[in-house]
Image (tube, rainbow, N blue to C red):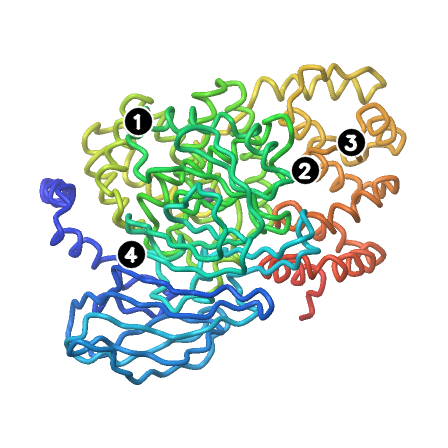
Amino acid sequence: MAIQQQLIQWASAATLVTAVASSANVWAQDAHSYAKLDEVTTPHLELDLTIDFAEKRLTGTATYDLARHGEADSIHLDTRELRIHKTEVWQDGAWQETAFALGEPHETLGQELTVAIGESSDKLRIHYETAPTASGLQWLTPAQTAGKKHPFMFSQSQPIHARSWIPIQDTPALRLTYNAELRTPKGLLAVMSADNSLSDNRDGSYSFTMPQPIPPYLIAIAAGDLEIKSISDNVAVFAESYIVDEAAWEWADTPAMIEATEEMYGPYRWDRYDLLVLPPSFPYGGMENPRLSFITPTVVSGDRSLINLIAHELAHSWSGNLVTNASWRDLWINEGFTSYVENRIMEALFGERRAQMELALGYQDLLVDMSRLAPEDTVLNIDLGTRHPDDVFSNVPYVKGQLFLVYLENKFGREKFDAFLRQYFDDFAFESISTAEFKDYIASNLLAKYPNVVSMDKINEWIHQPGLPADAPQPESDAFAQVEQQMQRWLKGGKLQTAEWTTHEWLHFINNLPLDISSTNMQRLDKDYDLTASKNAEIAHAWLKLAITKKYEPARERLRNYLLTIGRNKLVSPLYRELAKTPENLKWARDVYQQAKPGYHPLTQSVNEALLYPQN
Ligand SMILES: [Zn+2]
């Protein structure tokens, strides 16, 4: 134990030597990358790219600094569907062409790119172009945007899609800084997960710097007809004009969220924090691209009820972006910590009642997921093999990970647990860590420090066993208990008192209606509260899902419209899954899907095609 403690102290000194030594442990562990970080790493990238909307293609160069750790005379990079034109190394004061080879395509991993780098060159340049079908990019025609005049493109690199638009050592165990030069058609604004300018100049030529070392999955790009609206000195919204004012109003609490998080977990280390509103086809709720979170427009609800998503993406500035999972098996280290911090931010700003409702809603979602997942996929330190991480996406790393930390907070008390977390963010700042490293760290810095509170066996149960431990927290909410009482009265013909209800209470109400609810009661609810027409994307989702199950036909047209206009996978795939349960609905869903498909992101397409065309 003493030795362990000493090792951790050396690591906190964060000298280059200990950083390399501690990272070496995680370098061999990523089954989702061809990179061999123990031989050579790429600590800095210079991108020079032209964004070609007509051809749906990026063309240009990626130039890397090389840091050698072994004897290797070649480097192994990840690619997917890239066309490599030429590779060069910087040798004797000039660029010299060098040999490269592309491996056989692998369905999950893409293609290994091996480049000869000699024994002493310290720079590598790759000339390449992307495919129109790049899995990490979406290209929208002007007709698919809100403004209808200009095209839009954006990236989603997490987990292993950076390789579809940059030849790269695509493992989160690597950290690199980057600069970029981008060219777009005149009039469009390009942005990146870097130092975005607030200037209005749209001459089609843009430069970026990301001075903090980040994992490759956080390199991000977008371009479109964007406007900028500042919320404070260091927070602004980038969005198409139709929504820029609404989004800036919706997210006005962001600066206060930053302050609250700094108070709890130490400084925000990324300079600005801006928010980019993506088109409705964005497949996720949000993506924590550093300095510029990418956000779905479906959380601009007009009543600030869904801003826990902003708290979530902001929380990643500590958990995920600052301290990063070393491989996708360790995703809970990103998402469990972030879900926990998100809820703490919500509590700090809006009080315990709201935070508790959100925790309870997450817990309900987790139980639903756990009931459909194979037991081995409910393990935090999941064994992915070489399965695509996208195919195993669930609430487990998020909510089970969060409950693990809530459990620890309850056991050790908030004061001690907060101090532990703050130190953890400091000790591993700008590093990538594995589950094994986390276990060593918590053993020394929490369990041994306060003995006989939580055993290592219990930690192992949380991290390595399926399902939830018998003594796991079971979040409940008083507010929801009241909703359930009202529901019982309402089912017997009584009136609902909804004046004080927030989105959370509505979601709990709809999600917990009895499955044998009568069609008369469905109509009564819809008539009194206009649920089919709800402008809140989450409430509409819950209602439409129930409407499918209950064959409530008045909601059919809204359902069609919803599926045609929203591409956020969390909101559409449960609807397709529900529709796929009966032959008539499946036929109808396939028709709608085919119409919606051109507007869906590649990820949304692949997930929902698996639901609607399972024989493929
Ligand atoms: Zn997250």
Tell me if mark 3 has few (under 14), some (14-19) or many (20+) residues whose alpha carbon lies within 10 angstroms of its own: many
What is the spatial separation of the Cα atoms under label 4 and label 3, in whole angstroms? Answer: 48 Å
Q: At 32% from the left edge and 24% from the top edge, which residue is drawn? A: 263
- Residue located beneath label 2 in the image: 537
On-image quarter of the N terminus:
top left
> How many numbered marks does the figure carry?
4
What is the spatial separation of the Cα atoms under label 1 and label 2, in whole angstroms? Answer: 34 Å
Which dot, 4 or 2, sits closer to the camera? 4
Which dot, 3 or 1, sits closer to the camera? 3
167 to 374, vertically: above or below: below
**Sequence-first disc among 3 and 1:** 1
Which dot, 4 or 3, sits closer to the camera? 4
Q: Is mark 3 within 8 Å of ligand 1?
A: no
**Sequence-first disc among 4 and 3:** 4
- Residue located beneath label 3 in the image: 531
364 to 432, vertically: above or below: above
Amino acid marked by disc 3: Leu
Which dot, 1 or 2, sits closer to the camera? 2
Tell me if mark 4 has few (under 14), some (14-19) or many (20+) residues whose alpha carbon lies within 10 angstroms of its own: many
Secondary structure under the numbered disc 2 in the rendered image? helix
Amino acid marked by disc 1: Asp
Occupied quadrant, residue 7? top left
- Residue located beneath label 1 in the image: 418
Amino acid marked by disc 2: Ala
Q: Is mark 2 within 8 Å of ligand 1?
A: no
65 to 302, vertically: above or below: below
- Residue located beneath label 4 in the image: 176
